[in-house]
Amino acid sequence: MTLGSLTDGSVTNRFDLNGYNQTIAAILDAGPATNVVTNSGVGSPTLTLNGSTNTSFGTNGGIFSGNLSLARSGTGTITIWGNQTYTGTTLVNGGAIMLNGTHTGGALYTVNTRGTLFGTGTTTASVAAGNGGTIRPGNGVTPGTLTVGGLSFTGGVLNILLSGNSSSVLAVTGNANLTSGTVQFTYSGLTTNRYMFLTNEGAPITTTFLNAANVPPHLKVVYYANSVWLEGNPYCYAPVGGYVPYAANPNQVSVATSLNGFSPATEGSDQCTVIDALNALTNNPGEMQRAFNAISPQFYQSLATIAFNMANAQYNDLVEQMFGMRVAGTGFSMSGFGDNTPILEGQGDGVGVLDSKKDILRPGEDNHWGLFVDGNGIFAQANSGNMLPGYNAESGGVIAGLTYKWNPEFLTGIYSGYQGTLAKYSGYNAGSSVIDNAVRFGLLSTFGDPSGKGFYGDALVGGSYHNYNVNRAISFPGLNRTANSAPGAGELDSLLAAGYNWREGNWAFGPVSSLQYTYFGMNSFNETGAQSLDYQGLNWNSSSMIYNLGGNCAYSWQATKNLMVVPQINLAWQHEFLQNPYIISGTLAGSGIPVSNSSSAPLRDTFYTGIGVTLEYRKRWHMGLFYNAAAGNSDLVSHNIFWSLGYKF
C-alpha cells in the first residue's frame, strides 16, 4: 500500500484501521502530504506487514499514530523514519524493522524467532528479544547507536558490529535485564582493544549475558555500573624482578632491561606475545640467555668483522702481486729484464747489434700505461669471535684499474670494482643471512729501484660503500621471527708497505712490512618483520689497524724467450692494534628503553701464508694466481684465491 501517491499535497491521506486488524504485504508513503495510519475505532487493532518487499515509511510525512499496534512478519524490511506516536505494541515475528526515526509513547517491542530490530533511531518503549530474535544496532553494515527505553531477553541475541575503532551501541534509558541473552560480535579490522557496546543510563546494570559468542581473540566482555564493554584481557607482566636476574653478561643485561620496558603490556599486543614466550623460560635460565642473545643487536657488529677480513685479504694480495712483478722485471714493467737491458739481436741486416732500441720482442721505454683486472674469492669462517655470532662468509669480486709509470722508479694507478658477499650464520643467530653488494675504488702507487733489487714501497688509499640486505633470525622456544633491514655502510682503506729485495741468481727474497688501516661506518637503519623485536639502530663505527711483518721468496724461470714464470711464497705475522671494544646502540620497537651491545677485544695475532705464480709474456702481458690463508687465530680462518690479468701499452 502506498499513501500519498495521488495527492496534490494539500490534504492528509489517512488509512484508518477503525478497530479492525489489517494485514497487507507492505506500506510506504509518497508525496509531500501528511500520510497517517491511525485507528478511530475501539480497541488496539494490529496492522500486520507480511510481504517480502523492503519499504520505507516516514520519509514523506508518514506517521503511525493513535491506539494501534504494528506487526512485522514475512521476510521484508520496513525502515521507519520520522516521529512515530502509536501507542500499541510492536511485534517482529519475521523480517525486520529498521528504526531510524523516533517512536514515543509506544508499548513493548517484542522480537521473536527470525525477526530483527535494527537501526539508529530511538524508542521510549522497552524491547524484549525472544528465542531466535535479534537486536542489531546500526544499519546492519556499519556500526551505529540504537536507543531503547528498556531491555530484556528470553533467549534472544544482541548482535554488535565492530569495525576499526568503532562499535555499535545499544543505549538503554530504562532498566536492562541481560539474563538469558546472548551477545554476539561481528567484526573486521579491529584497531583498538576497548569497545563500549551497551549503556544504561536509567539504572545500574546488575545482570550479565548468558553467553558471549564470536568474541575477538584476546578481548572479553567487561561489565561496569552503567555500561558493558569489550576490552583487552588483563595486562601481562614480566616476572617479578624483571628479566635482568636471568642475564649472564652486560650485553644480556642491556637486552633484559629493554625487555622490561615491554611490561605491562595489553593482552593481545605483540609485546604481550613476547612476554608470554619469555616467561615460559623462567625455569630454564640457559634458554632465557639464548633468547637474549637472539634478540641482541650484536649480529650487526659482525658486518665490520667481515669487511675488515675482506680488506685484509685484498691488501695482502696487492703486496704479493707487486712483489711478483718486481721479481719478473722492474716494478710494474712486467718483464724479466729491464726496459733498457741491451740484448744482442740480428735485425735482418746481417749485423748483430747490442742495442735495446732494435729489440723487436720488447717494447721500448715509452710503455708507460698499464691496464689490469683482478678477481678474487674469499672464504671466511668465524667462530663467535669478539663476542660476535659465528658465520661462514663467501665473497667474490672483480676490480679493474689503470696505471701510469712516471719514471722507471715510480708508478701510480686508479682502480674500481665490485665485491659481493653472502654470509650465513650459526649459533644463536642460526638461519640469519647477509648479502653485501659493495662498490670499491681507490688509488695505488709503488716505488722501487728499476733493477728489482733494494728498497721499495707500496701505498694504497681507497674506500668502499656497502649495500646490505639483512635477514636476522630471532628464534627461541615459543617464538620464531625474522627481522629484515637494508643498512648502508662506508669504508675507508689505506696501506703503507715497505720491503727490501735481494737477488741471487734466479732467486729473489727479502723482508716486507706493512701497516694497513680500515675505517667502517654504519648508517642508522630500522628493521621490519619482527614487530616489537625490530631493532632501530643508530649509526656507529669501528676501525682496524693491522701491522704485517713477513718475508717473500720467489724464483725467476725464463721458460721461453717470451715467457717468464715466477712462483713465490709469502709468510707473515699479523697483529691487530685496533678493533677495540665498541658499543652499538638503538631501541627495540616495543620498548622505550635503549638497548646496546659491546664487543670485546679480538684475538690479535694471525699467521698469514700465501703461495702464487706470476706469468709475464712479451713484457706486455702478465697474469697472476695466488692463494692465501689466515690461520692460527681461533676466532677467524680465511682462505683466499686471487687472479689478475694485466696489459702494458
Image (tube, rainbow, N blue to C red):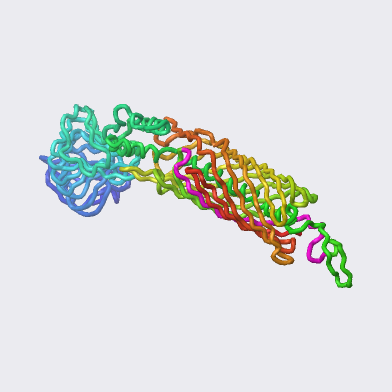
- Report which quarter residue 37 is drawn in: top left
Is residue 400 one of those drawn in magenta?
no
- Report which quarter residue 506 is drawn in: bottom right
Q: Going by the image, does 471 lie left or right of 522? A: left
Front-most of 15 and 371?
Answer: 371
Outermost front residue: 504
Front-most of 65 and 446?
Answer: 446
User: Can you give x and y, in whole percent of width and height, for residue 182 in the image?
Assistant: 18, 41
Q: Quadrant of the C terminus?
A: bottom right
Outermost left residue: 43
Residue at the image position 17 percent from the left and 34 percent from the top: 208
The residue stretch that appears in magenta: 359-386
- Count of labels in the image: 0
Q: Specify whether residue 69 is in view.
A: no
Residue at the image position 59 percent from the left and 38 percent from the top: 545
Front-most of 68 and 594?
Answer: 594
Front-most of 192 and 366?
Answer: 366
User: Can you give x and y, in whole percent of width and height, for residue 186 in the image?
Assistant: 27, 45
User: Can you give x and y, in whole percent of width and height, for residue 237 in the image?
Assistant: 30, 31
Residue at the image position 15 percent from the left and 36 percent from the top: 152
User: Can you give x and y, in whole percent of width and height, for residue 503 in the image?
Assistant: 72, 52
**Vertical arrangement, residue 570 with respect to residue 346, above or below:** above
Q: Specify whether residue 77 is in view.
A: yes
